[in-house]
């Protein structure tokens, strides 16, 4: 059984989250998502994919509660023995 989590995050972060490509995001945005990822990593939860085909406008998201275009990102808990 896998421990999967879905987070609604800004769609403009997909290149950074999936490819580690920070072109196109500001230093402030990078610092904000890095802090979010660091908190998840402490719980052994890491991003594994996203649903870009299902992008939509939301009045808030799980990163910063700002409105904008978002998509769902799949995170998975790593099982370490």
Image (spheres, rainbow, N blue to C red):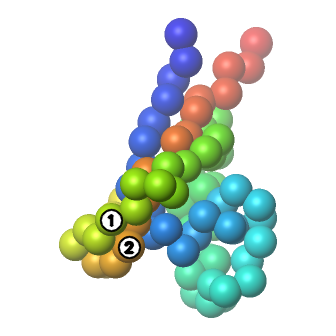
The structure residue drawn at horizontal position 77% and vertical position 61%, both measured from the top left corner, is 19
Q: CA distance from mark 1 to mark 2?
A: 5 Å
Q: Is residue 58 left or right of residue 35?
A: left
Residue 69 image label:
2
Residue 42 percent coordinates (x, y): 62, 43
Residue 72 image label:
none
Q: Is tag 1's residue or tag 2's residue first in the polypeptide sequence?
A: 1
Residue 72 percent coordinates (x, y): 43, 51
Q: Is residue 47 left or right of residue 74?
A: right
Give yes or no for contact between labels 1 and 2 (Cβ–Cβ under 8 Å): yes
Q: Quadrant of the C terminus?
A: top right
Q: Which residue is nearer to you in this view: 28 or 51?
A: 51
Residue 58 percent coordinates (x, y): 26, 68
Q: Is residue 63 visible?
A: no
Residue 59's quadrant in the figure?
bottom left
Residue 80 drawn above or below residue 49 = above
Q: Residues within 10 Å of mark 2 (few under 14, many from 20)?
A: some
Q: Is residue 33 visible?
A: yes
Q: Which residue is nearer to you in this view: 54 or 42?
A: 54
Outermost residue to the left: 59
Residue 18 drawn above or below residue 70 = above
Task: Name the residue carrying label 1.
Answer: 56
In terms of secondary structure, where does tag 1 sit?
Answer: strand
Residue 77 drawn above or below residue 56 = above
In terms of secondary structure, where does tag 2 sit?
Answer: strand
């Amino acid at each position: 059984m896998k421990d999967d989590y879905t987070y609604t995050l800004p769609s403009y972060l997909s290149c950074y989250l999936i490819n580690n490509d920070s072109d196109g995001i500001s230093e402030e945005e990078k610092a904000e998502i890095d802090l979010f990822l660091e908190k998840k990593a402490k719980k052994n939860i890491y991003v594994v994919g996203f649903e870009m085909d299902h992008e939509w406008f939301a009045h808030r998201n799980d990163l910063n509660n700002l409105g904008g275009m978002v998509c769902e990102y799949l995170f998975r808990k790593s099982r370490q023995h």
